[in-house]
Image (cartoon, grey):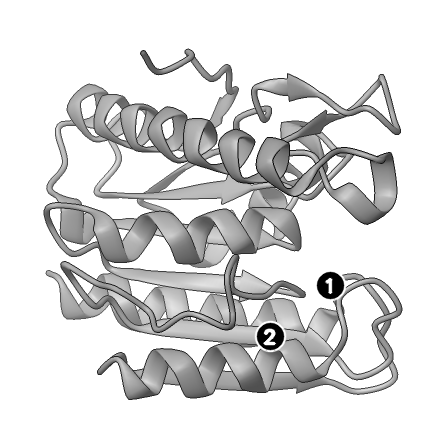
Amino acid sequence: MPRELKSERKGPRQADSVVVFLHGYGADGADLLGLADPLAPHLPGTAFYSPNAPEPCVNNPMGYQWFPIPWLDGSTDEQARAGAAQSFQDINAFLDKVLADEGLAADRLALVGFSQGTMMALAVAPQREQEMAGVVGFSGRLLEPERPVEARVKPPVLLIHGDQDPMVPFESMGIAGDALQKAGFTVYGHVMKNTGHGISPDGLSVALAFLKERFAAGL
């Protein structure tokens, strides 16, 4: 049974597209919903959501996690897999509700993830019944990079990563990109130079251009 995810909403009352942010480990929805402010003037018809992950973060009780991370919090691999599987269901149910509430088709939805949120976005999007407009993944990786990507649908993917990332190695971007391309996805990439585990202005600009292009393609 999916857990209900809580999110604020930003954007026009009647939206023609929607962006859902998935935050990183130990953060909360507000952490990424702030990105709506610089993006909204360029995406005037877009509604923005950024739900809190369903579990309090073991390492940061003020924040949340999509699943525990063994090397950070002492959880087991089995607990991490179970947490990710449950959050997979939670996110899918949340996306279904958002599309129903907004009265929009799947191709008017884009996912934007950061770190652990990127891992969830890259897991959820290919398994949706209908293809969404696209996925932007900042500073993340595939949940199981050693396994081939299985996909019901193949939305375009933009991967963005800092070349000085101390948390999720920069090499993760290339590994994910190669695996997605082998599975038949259209994949774009952008390197944020001299950037650690974060989102730089140039990275956000590239993400905005991708979102504008994808939403325009669906009109």
Observer able to see residue 117:
yes
Q: CA distance from mark 1 to mark 2?
A: 9 Å
Q: Tell me if label 1 and label 2 are in contact, CB under 8 Å.
A: yes
Disc 2 residue type (three-letter) = Ile
**At x 62% / y 52%, what residue is drawn?**
38
State which quarter of the image contains the N terminus: top left
Give the image location of residue 187, x and y in percent.
Answer: 37, 82
Q: Residues within 10 Å of mark 2 (few under 14, many from 20)?
A: many
Q: On screen, 115 above or below 66? A: below
Residue 42 as seen in the image, left or right of residue 107: right
- Closer mark to the observer between disc 1 and disc 2: 2
Q: On screen, 29 above or below 179? A: above
Residue at mark 1: 199
Secondary structure of residue under mark 1: loop
Q: On screen, 69 above or below 184? A: above
**At x 15% / y 56%, what residue is drawn?**
131
Q: In which image quadrant can residue 100 be found?
A: top left
Residue 30 as seen in the image, left or right of residue 75: left
Q: In which image quadrant can residue 199 be found?
A: bottom right
Secondary structure of residue under mark 2: strand
Residue at mark 2: 160
Q: On screen, 63 above or below 166? A: above
**At x 26% / y 35%, what residue is drawn?**
15
Give the image location of residue 201, x and y in percent.
Answer: 73, 70
Disc 1 residue type (three-letter) = Ile
Residue 213 as seen in the image, left or right of residue 219: right
Give the image location of residue 128, x and y in percent.
Answer: 20, 46
**At x 45% / y 59%, what residue is drawn?**
42
